[in-house]
Image (spheres, rainbow, N blue to C red):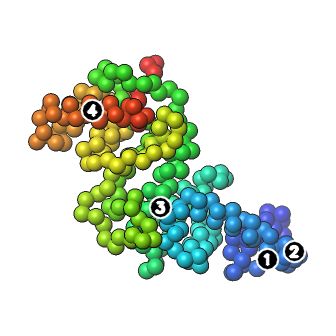
């Protein structure tokens, strides 16, 4: 057996000790150190990133969920800070929910992950403040996320477990403020549309932005949309959500 084969056999056992036997030449006491070390590290990172989700499970079920992730998911990154994203991908594309999983599981997991995603985002260094909304190109900063969910994810806890989606979506902006702290802001459909256009059209001008909004909401007067957009964007510039960029 080659060294690579030995490594693969060792890791297969560490990941799934219930179904894969350990190397016969290593005593179980030593193997157990590695079994606990690896799993506990993974479980610790997942639990710290998804504290509300974890609180909805008993310890056995939570450990089983993380164990399934540890056993079956092929992580695409070696970085510890990316473990939470890998867990979210596992839930979204690989995990088959059981009757004991809440119906809002994926939305809650994404909402919790967004906080860490914003916190560790490596921001571009070419942003500049917006001093004149009508003259400068507008950008949705890479340290902000424009989010919407069908469930009230911000209210979920062990004592509040909605069973059906809300009648209307819930909108949020998660962002890093000027002090580099992560903050959450409740939004609304109009604001979400405004931010979505800026995000998908980086460098858009204020006039073009309002024109696009007006094309989707023709029932509003153009002047009314201009005034509303200016008020909203002014606030978002101060919060560090909207910025401009240096000219080439």
Q: Which mark is residue 26?
A: 2
Q: Vertical placement of 26 versus 229: above or below?
A: below
Rendered residue at 28%/64% (across/down): 166
Q: Which residue is mark 4?
A: 231
How far apart, in angstroms, are the residues tagged by discs 2 and 3? 38 Å
Does 208 sit left or right of 63 as displayed?
left
Does 32 sit left or right of 93 as displayed?
right
Q: For numbered disc 4, what is the local secondary structure?
A: helix
Nearest to N terminus: mark 4 or mark 3: 3
How many other residues sit within 10 Å of disc 1, few (<14), some (14-19) or many (≥20)?
many
Asked whether 10 or 233 is in front, the reply is: 233
Give percent across and percent down for residue 34: 78, 68
Q: Which mark is residue 78?
A: none
Nearest to N terminus: mark 2 or mark 3: 2
How far apart, in angstroms, are the residues tagged by discs 3 and 1? 34 Å
How far apart, in angstroms, are the residues tagged by discs 2 and 4? 67 Å
Give percent across and percent down for residue 224: 15, 34
Any part of residue 101 in sight: yes
Q: Which residue is mark 1?
A: 22
Q: Which residue is mark 3?
A: 109
Q: For numbered disc 2, what is the local secondary structure?
A: loop
Q: For numbered disc 3, what is the local secondary structure?
A: helix
């Amino acid at each position: 057996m080659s060294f690579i084969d030995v490594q693969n056999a060792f890791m297969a056992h560490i990941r799934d000790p219930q179904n894969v036997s350990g190397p016969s030449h290593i005593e179980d006491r030593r193997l157990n150190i590695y079994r606990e070390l690896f799993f506990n590290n993974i479980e610790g990172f997942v639990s710290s990133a998804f504290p509300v989700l974890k609180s909805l499970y008993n310890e056995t079920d939570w450990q089983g969920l993380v164990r399934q992730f540890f056993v079956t998911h092929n992580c695409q990154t070696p970085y510890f800070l990316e473990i939470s994203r890998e867990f979210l991908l596992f839930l979204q594309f690989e995990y088959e929910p059981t009757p004991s999983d809440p119906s809002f599981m994926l939305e809650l997991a994404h909402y919790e992950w967004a906080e860490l995603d914003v916190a560790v985002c490596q921001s571009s260094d070419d942003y500049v403040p917006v001093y004149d909304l009508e003259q400068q190109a507008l950008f949705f900063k890479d340290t902000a996320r424009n989010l919407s969910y069908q469930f009230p994810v911000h209210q979920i806890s062990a004592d509040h477990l909605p069973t059906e989606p809300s009648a209307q979506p819930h909108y949020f902006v998660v962002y890093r403020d000027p002090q580099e702290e992560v903050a959450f802001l409740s939004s609304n459909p109009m604001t979400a549309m405004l931010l979505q256009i800026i995000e998908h059209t980086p460098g858009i001008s204020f006039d073009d932005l309002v024109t696009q909004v007006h094309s989707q909401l023709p029932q509003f007067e153009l002047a009314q949309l201009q005034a509303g957009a200016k008020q909203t964007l002014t606030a978002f510039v101060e919060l560090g959500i909207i910025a401009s960029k240096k000219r080439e």
